[in-house]
Image (tube, grey):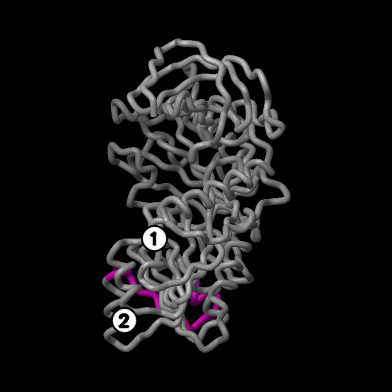
Amino acid sequence: MREVHLEKNQMLTVTIEDLTHDGSGVAKIDGYPLFIKDGLPGEEVRVKVVKVNKKFGFARIEKIEKESPNRVTPPCPVYHKCGGCQLQHLSYEGQLLFKKNQVEQLIRRVGKLETEVLPTIGMAKPFRYRNKSQVPVGYVNGKLGAGFYQKRSHDIIDMETCLIQDEKSDAAIQEAREVFAEFYTEPYNEVTHHGDLRHIMTRVGKSSGELMLVLITRTLDFPNKEAIVEQLKKRVSGVTSIVQNVNPNKTNVILGDKTVTLFGPDTITDSIHGIQFAISARSFYQVNPEQTEILYQKALDAADLTGNETVIDAYCGIGSISLCLAQKAKHVYGVEIVDQAIHDARKNAKLNQIENVTFETGKAEEVIPAWYKKGIRADVLVVDPPRKGCDEKLLATILKMQPKKVVYVSCDPATLARDLRILNEGGYGVSTVQPVDMFPMTTHVENVVALELK
């Protein structure tokens, strides 16, 4: 790359060549990358340089000289301020292609594999899909506001609706905000560590229609608590339970350790593949139930169970994939480091009268070898790790145990590619990669990969 001399506020006309993992456009000047928010591949744009680093810079679009045929007008009025979505300006067909290309590039560059990446499975209606919403509250222009943070800041964008949230969530959050405003509840201030109300969260059971309202507060007691709960019961349409979560810590982590139920049951229910799940305020549960049905079906297809297999689910959470697998396996063993999740998993197994499952709390890389010593041999091992990917020790455990098949469900294509390379070098052949669009209008994409021992 030739040395490039750019200055802040310099005006340039450039052509967008590609998109980054976070949806920014990329133009190159003699090999020097310039990242341009809201730019789309193929567009010729007039930009203003806003920041220059040694290896890359940032610029802002001043005028689009030549527009991409995939550019659309974002339907959300606060899209360009809010940090919740990144791709509303890109047509949905363009989003699905972007996600496929992103996965393909990472599998080749990081994974060193020439594996086929199938077209991304999208939604017929890619809006209003989220069954969970959690928004911070704070003063906005002197009034109590609730909404997502502005991009790259902690300034709240006060909003009445979010186009990727369930309508029930929108209505519940607005009504709750009005109730708290009427009682002059003080919102939490993360600088001074004062105030009572931190976040308002909702969970919706798509199949049951149940609605949980979660009030995340700094302290267990706050002014007018009983009167506020009575008003919420009357005014939040369709609410079936009201839960309070207490987070006294000075942290960006949303939920605290203590949860109390103020009204109704402490869970709502939903179903995937005919299996009922009890979901508490702190349960991990996929936020797009329509696409979860597809994601789990692809995982089941990859496992290709006959009814005779022993299956290990290495990051089982509340047992959502484990219980789906148990319908077609001889026995499923699930392990998860979060004790509350294992409690929920056992509860869900009992709820569905599924007995061929065993759940245990602990680190997968410690529990699975212990099972192995007891004679438990996995024919199929399923991993659905967090964004950081599989633990190195777990990957070593898999290679040592050598299950016939590994099914990898991933929420981060970069760590997926890294882990696939390790498993491939350890003797596993990688078949096709199937992206599933769980989060339309955002840059996130899930994948299902089947691996077989060579």
* Mark 2: secondary structure: helix
Image mark for residue 334: none
When asked about the image quadrant of residue 389, the answer is bottom left
Percent coordinates x, y for residue 311 in the rendering: 45, 79
**Looking at this view, is 139 or 29 the one in front?**
29
Percent coordinates x, y for residue 147 in the rendering: 52, 32
- Residue at (66% x, 41% y) in the render: 94
- Residue at (54% x, 48% y) in the render: 132
Can I make out residue 351 in this image? yes
Quadrant location, the C terminus: bottom left
**Looking at this view, is 316 or 69 the one in front?**
69
Q: Name the residue that disc number 2 marks.
A: 371
Q: CA distance from mark 2 to mark 1?
A: 23 Å
Can I make out residue 211 in this image? no
Q: Is residue 333 magenta?
A: no
Q: Left or right: where does residue 174 sit relative to residue 221?
A: right
Q: Which residues are magenta?
A: 347-365
